[in-house]
């Protein structure tokens, strides 16, 4: 198969479109190229790096929770662990794109994916349209931070921000800060602002589980299997971290050493000056940091009507059951970096079978 993109008028025809150039998208593209499938990558970012471009400059490489090499040709470089991940990983991704010769077009924001003509999916962007035999969606979650609703939050007189907007501890000096959420993002914030802020409170819906001992491949597979079970049933995915608990990472150890991981149960409402619980307890606050995770960025897939009665998208591996021309990578069990490479290969393998079947049928 040719690896060039043919064009017809304002609409380009291609074997596959990959939406997103983070780890999952680049992994998928690598295997599509290896299998001889013509494709293009459409990435909304201004440059390489995916979500890593937007991480806090205080998230250094020694604090990063789980980085895995992109497949095939370029290993993660040995770097100073004190360097920001927002610098190291975009540079690594840029080198990978160049060395692999991947056709990334950016910035190209995909507006919609819909059913097209001649058995193709129509991918619409501000830069034109692509008609593809298959689509790999790798848009991740970073652009969709989750803000949970709590009564009174809109009347809070202090500052509220999501972890996606966190840029380091300096701006919290002398303030009373509440961090909401039970994952590594919350631990990252607490590890840095404790001792800088006037006070910190850590609030979670469920008691956190600090995982003792090593986290090996068997544990990782078991956690991924729990998430995969949900998406096979058509339920909204949960994060892999929710199934693994908090390991003793660098940020968790630092937060523990500073005494910042003394968890309180979830408050019942936000007051203008802080928080209140049903048992009568109150706490003053100047800032609330919502380290409450992200949701999959899938709004552009709405024309395909993929969501089922359970509120999720039913999956078979990376393939969408209701739309077999569409694969979701970086979704559900492949949302962690450990699952992205495996999901990319699986998606490319299925697309090769689909296209070979289409050719044979023609």
Image: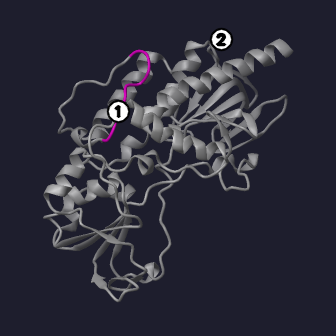
Between 91 and 162, the one lying in front of the other is 162
Q: Residues within 10 Å of mark 2 (few under 14, many from 20)?
A: few
Between 66 and 31, the one lying in front of the other is 66
Does the magenta-highlighted stretch encompass residue 194? no
Question: The residue tagged with tag 1: helix, strand or loop?
Answer: loop
Quarter of the image for residue 324 reads top right
Could you tell which of marks 1 and 2 lies nearer the N-terminus? Answer: 2
What color scheme is it? one colour
User: Is residue 318 shown above or below 33?
Assistant: below
* Residue of label 1: 216
Q: CA distance from mark 1 to mark 2?
A: 41 Å
83 on left or right of 32? left
Main SS class of the magenta portion in the image: loop
Say which residue appears at 47% left-offset and 33% top-offset. Answer: 339
Name the quadrant of the N terminus: top right
Quarter of the image for residue 326 reads top right
Quarter of the image for residue 269 reads bottom left
Residue 335's x, y, as percent?
Answer: 49, 41
Say which residue appears at 21% left-offset and 56% top-offset. Answer: 191
Residue 186's x, y, as percent?
Answer: 32, 58
Say which residue appears at 62% left-offset and 14% top-offset. Answer: 3
Residue 164's x, y, as percent?
Answer: 39, 55
33 on left or right of 10? left
Question: The residue tagged with tag 2: helix, strand or loop?
Answer: loop
Q: Which label number is shown at residue 2?
A: 2
Name the quadrant of the C terminus: top right
User: Is residue 345 shown above or below 182?
Assistant: above
Does residue 331 show up?
A: no
Say which residue appears at 31% left-offset and 41% top-offset. Answer: 65
Q: Which residues are magenta?
A: 65-73
User: Is residue 126 shown above or below 94?
Assistant: below
């Amino acid at each position: 198969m040719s690896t060039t993109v043919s064009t017809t008028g304002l609409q380009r025809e291609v074997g596959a479109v990959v939406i997103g150039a983070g780890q999952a998208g680049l992994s998928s593209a690598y295997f599509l190229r290896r299998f001889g499938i013509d494709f293009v990558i459409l990435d909304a970012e201004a440059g390489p790096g995916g979500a890593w471009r937007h991480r806090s400059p205080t998230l250094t490489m020694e604090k990063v929770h789980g980085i895995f090499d992109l497949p095939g040709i370029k290993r993660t470089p040995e770097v100073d662990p004190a360097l920001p991940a927002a610098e190291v990983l975009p540079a690594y991704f840029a080198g990978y794109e160049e060395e692999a010769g991947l056709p990334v077009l950016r910035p190209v924001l995909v507006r919609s994916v819909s059913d097209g003509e001649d058995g193709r999916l129509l991918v619409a962007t501000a830069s034109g349209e692509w008609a593809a035999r298959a689509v790999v969606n790798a848009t991740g979650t970073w652009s969709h931070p989750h803000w949970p609703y709590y009564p009174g939050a809109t009347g809070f007189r202090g500052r509220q921000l999501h972890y996606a907007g966190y840029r380091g501890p300096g701006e919290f000096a002398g303030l009373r800060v509440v961090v909401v959420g039970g994952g590594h993002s919350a631990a990252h914030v607490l590890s840095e602002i404790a001792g800088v802020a006037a006070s910190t409170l850590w609030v979670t819906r469920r008691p956190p589980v600090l995982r003792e001992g090593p986290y090996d491949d068997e544990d990782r597979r078991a956690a991924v299997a729990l998430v995969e079970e949900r998406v096979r049933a058509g339920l909204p995915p949960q994060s892999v971290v929710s199934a693994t608990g908090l390991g003793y990472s660098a940020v968790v150890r630092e937060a523990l050493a500073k005494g910042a991981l003394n968890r309180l149960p979830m408050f019942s409402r936000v007051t203008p000056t802080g928080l209140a619980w049903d048992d009568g307890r109150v706490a003053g606050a100047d800032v609330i940091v919502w380290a409450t995770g992200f949701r999959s960025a899938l709004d552009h897939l709405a024309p395909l009507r993929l969501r089922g009665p359970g509120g999720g998208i039913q999956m078979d591996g990376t393939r969408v059951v209701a739309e077999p021309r569409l694969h979701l990578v970086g979704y559900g069990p492949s949302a962690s970096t450990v699952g992205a490479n495996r999901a990319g290969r699986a998606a490319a393998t299925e697309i090769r079978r689909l296209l070979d079947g289409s050719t044979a049928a023609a």
